[in-house]
Image (cartoon, rainbow, N blue to C red):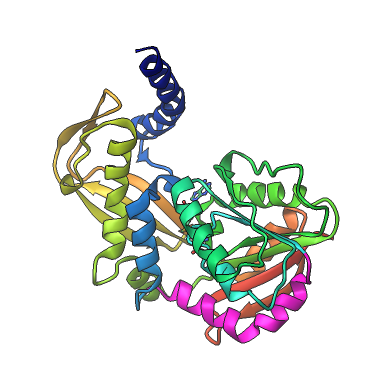
């Protein structure tokens, strides 16, 4: 009986701040949900499926850039570094650099403990000599790295254009956080999606198989499971459009009819046609992005692109 009380208290302590953050977004005008809530087990699997879609050029081109320029990229980073990857997810992209790059330590970080540990287990099996110190954290709440890590150059690895999910000012702040976690030599290897024809962008986020739609809608099930609720994905449709003025893809869940739902005991009302904003994905010309990274204290060193200049991989040093 006593144990059950303790468990209940612990559970409440974990879910209350989450509930507050999520409900604040759903009470706001317009309603919004942070993209970090996409990633329960199903969301992570759907994201991995997206990366294999024909229309989703992002991963395909980023992989091609790494294949073509791997030795230059590894030379820019240097050997023996501490490689830190926020939002590492499946830890697939570090494989593009191994075994050529021989980091002294690899720290993948992710908000989803289950997904991270499963990925690290697979990685350790394939690269038994790689030292891995994984860390579960919400990197939007700060990058608190363990203080018992080796004092070697620290290089952040942030592929997939995940930086595009931040508002531009928040992207500068996040890069500043990475920059201040580097005390001596080190840098940032980052993948950035570039501005391009609207039709290409539209197709990438509105794939014919409907996987991106499933990914977007799945956030509702994730919230129901996290907080207790009856948000019904059948009452919403996936909307993704390119906002040319702001240079970003905007993703929404649009309510198809007027209805109410309950989440964490709170009643939420949705008008017909009302949208929940679930994600932005900013696109940058290289010069635009370089200016943001410089404001965060990084020094541009290298830029690698595919032939059409649809995707950029950049290396910045800390000095
Ligand atoms: C779009 S996936 C990218 C995975 C991988 N880096 C790639 O480029 O393919 C985003 C990953 O970041 C994690 N993530 C999202 N927001 C996060 C946050 N605020 N803190 C930590 N991890 C986060 C998710 O759980 C997911 O595994």
Q: Residue at the spot x=75%, y=63% of the render?
A: 104
Residue 269's quadrant in the figure?
top left
Location of residue 223 in the rendering, given as x and y in whole percent from the top left corner: 32, 39
Residue range in magenta is 56-80
Check if residue 204 falls in the magenta segment: no
Which quadrant would residue 5 be assigned to in this image?
top left
Of 308 and 36, nearer the camera is 36
Residue sitting nearer the eye, 41 or 286: 41
237 shown above or below 276: below
**Quick one: quadrant of the C terminus?**
bottom right
Apparent side of residue 28 relative to residue 148 in the rendered image (left or right): left
Most extreme residue toward the top, as rendered? 2
Q: Main secondary structure of the magenta part?
A: helix
Q: Residue 230, can we see it?
A: yes
Q: In which quarter of the image is the N terminus?
A: top left
Viewed as shown, does residue 314 lie left or right of 18? right
Label total for image: 0
Residue 190 spot, x, y in % from top left: 63, 65
Image quarter of residue 132: bottom right
Q: Which of 167 and 75 is in front in this view?
A: 75
Q: Can you see residue 160? A: no
Q: Residue at x 65, y 44 (%)?
A: 143
Q: Where is residue 52 in the image (x, y as percent from the top left)?
A: 38, 74
On screen, residue 75 above or below 191? below
**Residue 164 vertical position relative to residue 33 in the rendered view, above or below:** below
Q: Which residue is drawn at 37% across and 30% down?
A: 23
* Residue displayed at 46% across by 56% down: 118
């Amino acid at each position: 009986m006593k144990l059950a009380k303790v468990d209940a208290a612990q559970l409440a302590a974990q879910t209350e701040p989450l509930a507050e953050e999520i409900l604040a977004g759903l009470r706001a005008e317009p309603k919004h949900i942070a993209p970090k809530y996409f990633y329960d087990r199903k969301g992570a699997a759907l994201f991995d499926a997206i990366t294999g879609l024909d229309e989703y050029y992002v991963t395909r081109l980023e992989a091609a850039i790494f294949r073509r320029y791997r030795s230059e990229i590894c030379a820019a980073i240097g050997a023996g570094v501490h490689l830190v990857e926020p939002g590492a997810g499946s830890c697939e992209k570090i494989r593009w650099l191994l075994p050529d790059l021989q980091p002294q330590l690899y720290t993948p970080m992710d908000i989803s403990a289950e997904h991270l540990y499963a990925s690290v287990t697979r990685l350790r099996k394939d690269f038994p000599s790689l030292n891995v110190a994984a860390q579960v954290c919400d990197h939007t709440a700060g990058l608190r790295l363990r203080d018992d890590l080796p004092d070697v150059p620290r290089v952040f690895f942030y592929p997939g254009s995940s930086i595009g999910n931040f508002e531009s000012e928040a992207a500068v702040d996040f890069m500043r956080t990475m920059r201040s976690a580097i005390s001596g030599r080190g840098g940032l290897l980052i993948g950035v999606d570039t501005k391009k024809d609207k039709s290409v962008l539209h197709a990438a986020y509105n794939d014919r198989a409907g996987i991106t739609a499933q990914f977007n809608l799945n956030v509702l099930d994730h919230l129901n499971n996290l907080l207790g609720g009856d948000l019904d994905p059948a009452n919403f449709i996936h909307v993704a459009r390119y906002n040319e003025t702001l240079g970003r893809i905007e993703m929404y869940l649009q309510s198809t009819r007027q209805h109410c739902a309950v989440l964490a005991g709170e009643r939420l009302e949705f008008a017909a046609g009302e949208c929940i904003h679930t994600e932005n994905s900013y696109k940058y010309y290289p010069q635009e992005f370089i200016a943001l990274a410089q404001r965060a204290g990084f020094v541009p060193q290298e830029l690698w692109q595919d032939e059409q200049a649809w995707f950029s991989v950049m290396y910045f040093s800390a000095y």
